[in-house]
Amino acid sequence: MSETITPSIPAVSNTFEIKIIEAEKTALKNGVPVYFVNAGTQDIVRLEIYFDAGIIRQQKPFQAFLTNLMLIEGTTNRSSAQISEDIDFYGGYLSVDYAKDFASLTLHILNKYFDKGLEVIKDILQNANFPQNELDTMIANQKSAYMVDVEKVSYVAQKKLNELMFKGHPYGTASTADDFNKISREDILAFYKYYNLSFAQITLSGKIEQKEIDLLDKYLGIIPVSAKEKSPFPASFSFDAGKHFVEKKDAMQSAIKVGGHLPFKGTQDFYGLLVLNTIFGGYFGSRLMNNIREDKGWTYGISSYIESTAIDSCLIISTEVKGDIAEKALAEIFVEMDKLSTELVAEDELEKVRTYMLGKFLKNLDGPFEVCDRFWGIQQFGLGYEYYHQYIKTIKTISAEELQRLAKKYFDKDKLVCLIAGIR
């Protein structure tokens, strides 16, 4: 009789070391800091310029948004079409983005044409003129897009959540379609002052050698900067905890948004909250997904995430369900919070989450652009690489008891905004 051999499955180990390539620092001759990651194998470079031009600086709804979009819509030397043609001709890609605290201008281009791209960047930073005809078209297009978005319960819910969580602060500015009509070219020009290099930070990633640094200095190092100190971010706001409902009678589904305030990124409890959130709703195998999607079939997806800003961090929970079960789904979210507060996480579940988080972190270090993204993820908050060392250490060592302590402290439904938008 032949012997049956059962193959052994090796145990998963999370004891391996993760090495992080750290960004190097230099400065242009005008003093603007440049952080670069030389880790590319292909002849391509990514330039990102981060400006103190986020939502937190705006005085009117859509001011930061429209200024950011209009940045590449024309200069005194180039039309919007010419800007696109000049970049496209050399196989480059130019994009803009904005967020709560910063705005950015990003260029991807081959190393051998980096100087050509920098010529356009320099022109935009010094000579953007925001043509009235381009602005009128942009406002009309974005207003139309806004009118489409406000018919979506997910958009309505997120917009209202921001208003409730940051009352009296630029993050929570209420807006309507009519606010597009209140933005003038003068408003755009006034906000353009934030797109200067005085308080900007530059990152370079890809195949970076001294010639790329020299070219950056040649084109951007000659732009004058101000010696003024950066004004502090507005930090005061009020918070409207409790249940809220925004009715949309014709909605097919209802959107659920739950939000709460957490400590600053990099503070003591923050690292453990990242692990706790992953267990709760931060990946496909999370408790919220298992309960509300897999067990009950109420949604295609539900997630929770932690968003950090210049003034605090927030826990956000988001899903869409049929309107008649929205209250039930909200109740189940609290059930999962209560379980984490009253029951210890099983070791096998915790080990699975450890493996997932470490694997995801490794994936996010795969390539020079990703490595540079990790750098900006700490630089914008004034943190150093010790943040990631502590993050990895916490993932590997945090106990079930510590996770329960954090859940008891921060999963307090009386301190959460609970919002349903749609029908119920």
Image (cartoon, grey):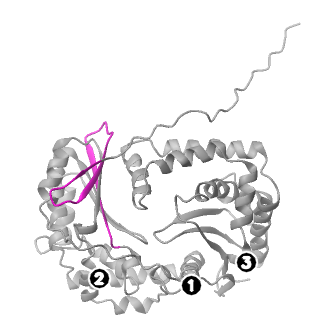
Task: Give the secondary structure at mark 3.
Answer: helix
Q: Is residue 32 magenta?
A: yes
Question: Which residue shows up at 27% across the image and 73% down it?
Answer: 229
**Mark 1 vs mark 2, CA separation in Å:** 36 Å
List the residue tagged with mark 3. 414
Mark 1 or mark 3, which is nearer the start of the sequence?
A: 1
Which picture quadrant has residue 206?
top left
Work out whether residue 144 can be spotted: yes
Question: Which residue shows up at 68% across the image and 67% down it?
Answer: 410
Residue 363 vs 80, above or below: the answer is: above
Q: Estimate the x, y position of residue 42 in percent, counting from the top left.
A: 29, 38
Q: Estimate the x, y position of residue 279 in percent, counting from the top left.
A: 69, 54
Apparent side of residue 222 relative to residue 152 in the rendered image (left or right): left
Residue 61 vs 120, above or below: the answer is: below
- Label 3: few (<14), some (14–19) or many (≥20) C-alpha neighbours in 10 Å: few
Apparent side of residue 55 relative to residue 105 in the rendered image (left or right): right
Task: Give the secondary structure at mark 1.
Answer: loop
> Is 320 in front, or is 358?
358
Look at the image and tell me in which quarter the C terminus lies: bottom right
Range of residues picked out in magenta: 25-53
**Mark 2 vs mark 3, CA separation in Å:** 45 Å
Look at the image and tell me in which quarter the N terminus lies: top right
Which picture quadrant has residue 351?
top right
- Label 1: few (<14), some (14–19) or many (≥20) C-alpha neighbours in 10 Å: few
> Is 45 in front, or is 382?
382
Mark 2 or mark 1, which is nearer the start of the sequence?
A: 2
List the residue tagged with mark 1. 238
Q: Are marks 1 and 2 in contact (CB under 8 Å)?
A: no
> Is 86 in front, or is 409?
409
List the residue tagged with mark 2. 137
Apparent side of residue 187 relative to residue 403 in the rendered image (left or right): left
Q: Is residue 387 magenta?
A: no
